[in-house]
Amino acid sequence: MEFTLFVILYLMLTIAWLFSVLFILFMTYGILAVKVPYVPVSQKIVDATRTTIPLKSGDVLYDLGSGDGRVIAALAEDCPTARAIGVEKAPLPYFLSLFRFWKKPLSNTKVLFKDFSKVSLADATHVYMYLFPEVVESLLPKLNKDLRPGTIVVSCDFPFKSKEFERTVEIGKGYNKHTLYLYTF
């Protein structure tokens, strides 16, 4: 009896250890491949984004590096006649977003498992991103090429260095302070 309990405990610990190692490898691959770690957006940022990007019927929002899809979910709920498209190339957040939309389907959302530098943004009316500064800056030529005049771009926390923003929206205070930078292309 004691031997059986020992074997069961040993197997459980081994399986837990294997899952931990696989999770760490999965996360490390995601960070190395994407160059941006998965950081879930706070509800305060989602709420501020909702008021900053009021979608209208026919609008098309792209969330570049959409993570678990919470931004596109919120904006798609606000305007069911607009489309919200998430673009994510890290496996873990991509699968989290698929789970989110499996649990609560929204017909006007889509999540692409792609590198956003390879996705055409020609139909975008709005673009949202929460990316590292060097990634934000590297996107500027693509945005200038792909976006139609009048497209609204919102970058959370990291502005373009070589493009002036139109306005900012401050969220929170102190350590929890965030800034949305708004641009019109």
Image (spheres, rainbow, N blue to C red):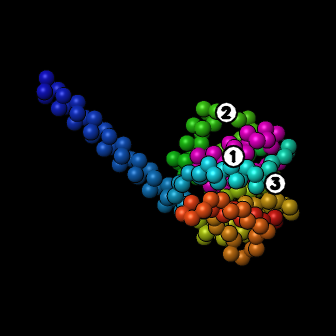
In the displayed structure, would residue 50 be above or below residue 5?
below
- Residue at x 54%, y 63% (from the top left corner): 175
Identify the residue under disc 2: 105
* Residue at 73%, 45% in the rendered image: 75
What residue did someone put label 1 on?
Answer: 72
Question: Where's the N terminus, which quadrant?
Answer: top left
Relative to 150, 178 lies left or right: left
Other-residue count near label 1 (Cα within 10 Å), few / some / many at <14 / 14–19 / ≥20: many
Residue range highlighted in magenta: 59-82
Q: CA distance from mark 2 to mark 1?
A: 12 Å
> Relative to residue 7, is residue 55 drawn left or right?
right
Please tell me in which quadrant of the rendered image residue 5 appears.
top left
Q: Which mark is residue 125?
A: 3
Residue 99: give its label: none
Image x and y of residue 69, in percent? 63, 45
Residue farthest bottom in this picture: 162
Q: Earlier in the sequence, mark 3 or mark 2?
A: 2
Q: Quadrant of the C terminus?
A: bottom right
Whether 149 is among the magenta residues is no
At horizontal 70% and vertical 56% (from top left) the residue drawn is 128
> Alpha-carbon distance for marks 3 and 2?
23 Å
